[in-house]
Amino acid sequence: QVQLGESGGGLGQAGGSRRLSCAAPGSIRRINAMGWYRQAPGKQRELVATITSGGITNYADSLKGRFTISRDNVKNTVYLQMNSLNPEDTAVYYCNAYRQLRPTTPRFDYWGRGTQVTVSS
């Protein structure tokens, strides 16, 4: 099974910052976009941010201005800079990558195993 490699999770304090990284294997080519999702206990998975190979970003409205997503297309790597953390950011963060041959073709998604981010007050 192809799996994305995630790193950067851990325990942090409110008001602090963390940076998550996710790398796709070299065997995955022509990735349209990469991004991050998160799931807190008792809640559904939700979008955090995505970025296309062309640099177009999309953020959850509640996270705009506080989280920043960036990319390195050469390394097939995506980063998530998280600032001004609060306990509500505590969740398992999942990396995602997908490719889609054309808009009318179903997309194919790849996922990481998830990395735990815990923010204490």
Image (cartoon, rainbow, N blue to C red):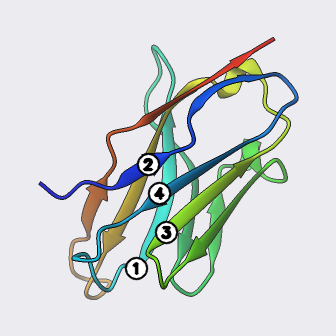
Q: Secondary structure at mark 4?
A: strand
- Amino acid type of the residue that numbered disc 1 sits on in the rendered structure: Asn
The residue wearing badge 4 is: 22
Q: Position of residue 104 (x, y in %)?
A: 25, 83
Choose between 22 and 33: the one closer to the eye. 22
- Amino acid type of the residue that numbered disc 2 sits on in the rendered structure: Glu
Cβ–Cβ under 8 Å for marks 3 and 2: no
Q: Position of residue 6 (x, y in %)?
A: 44, 48
Q: Position of residue 57 (x, y in %)?
A: 64, 70
Residue 6 numbered tag? 2
Above or below residue 11? Residue 61 is below
- Amino acid type of the residue that numbered disc 4 sits on in the rendered structure: Cys
Residue 77 numbered tag? 3
Quote the CA–CA distance across marks 4 and 3: 5 Å
Quote the CA–CA distance across marks 3 and 1: 13 Å
Quote the CA–CA distance across marks 4 and 2: 4 Å
The residue wearing badge 1 is: 32
- Local packing at callout 2 (Cα closer than 10 Å; few below 14, some 14-19, many 20+) is many
- Of callouts 4 and 3, the N-terminal one: 4
Quote the CA–CA distance across marks 1 and 4: 15 Å
- Amino acid type of the residue that numbered disc 3 sits on in the rendered structure: Thr
- Of callouts 1 and 2, the N-terminal one: 2
Q: Name the image quarter holding the C terminus.
A: top right
- Of callouts 1 and 4, the N-terminal one: 4
Cβ–Cβ under 8 Å for marks 1 and 4: no
